[in-house]
Image (cartoon, rainbow, N blue to C red):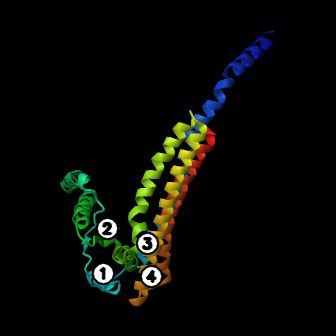
Amino acid sequence: MKFLEKEADLSDIWEASKPYVKPAAIVGGLIGIPILIDQIAGVGHQALTDSMKNMLKKDKFKADFSSLINDAKKIGNISNTPHIVIEGYNNAAYIPPKSIPDHTKNQWKKQANQLLKSKDKDLVNKGKFIQRSLEFSNKPNGGIIIGDKFDNPAVVSHEIGHAIINANGGFDKLVQDYSATLKNVGVPISLVGLATKMLKPDLGDYIFFGGLGTFGLGALGKLYTEWNASSHAKNILKEMDMDSETKNDLLNYALGTYAIKDVAETAKGLTRWGLLK
């Protein structure tokens, strides 16, 4: 009899909890699945990054780095675009003109000054990067920042490729200038759509897919820009007789790191939408 009573109690508990199972599963999915997607994407991103680091070690440039940059800029017909090499810095970037909004410059200056006072060399180098980025953002042609740990012709040529896109103007420059903005705007719009969906499903769907589409356009634009910059880089490397399979792989793997991030972000958005559907 006691066994039957316990069985009845469990049955009552199950019946009472049924209305909460689905909401709990949805909440769990909304929290857990995006984390899982980030973890999976992180593994792929790290694998490509590690491969790129190994390529950089094997394909170390031993000649005069400054001459390489000047020669590459001359081939790309952008000799009037300034560049700086930061000792110990482990990244590279092209800073387009007016890429840092005026209303944020004081905030960036403060952050740079704080980092420059640090005893950590990596933080100091980051401060130098911000400082130079602010400087180049005010230049009519922008500027190129190269860390001497990235003293590889492929890396240099890729950033010069971005400068060439800016100099040439037209559609390619438009895509380079606005792809990041579309991505940044698309994500919050899609989140607003998910929130609206809980009250007005049809309207929420329109807003969500509008945001996701905006993000997608930005993501495609970013990938196109990176591919375009790498295409310019490969042409520069050929002109300099420095093209090789390793350098091509380095450029292709770099493109893959952007693709992984964008696919992960899209998958997270669709997962959230599916769970709320």
**How many tags in the picture?**
4
Q: Residue 51, can we see it?
A: no
Q: Amino acid at mark 1?
A: Ile
Is residue 153 rendered to the left or right of residue 207?
Answer: left
Q: Which-is-in-front pick, marks 1 and 3? A: 3
Q: CA distance from mark 1 to mark 3?
A: 19 Å
- Secondary structure, mark 4, is helix
Vertical order, 249 against 177 (above or below): below
The residue that label 3 is drawn on is 171
Frontmost residue, 188 versus 202: 202
The residue that label 1 is drawn on is 78
Vertical order, 125 against 71 (above or below): above
The residue that label 2 is drawn on is 96
The residue that label 4 is drawn on is 234
Vertical order, 23 against 146 (above or below): above
Q: Could you tell me residue 201's position as x and y percent? A: 60, 38
Q: CA distance from mark 2 to mark 4?
A: 21 Å
- Secondary structure, mark 2, is loop
Q: Could you tell me residue 164's position as x and y percent? A: 36, 77
Q: CA distance from mark 4 to mark 3?
A: 21 Å
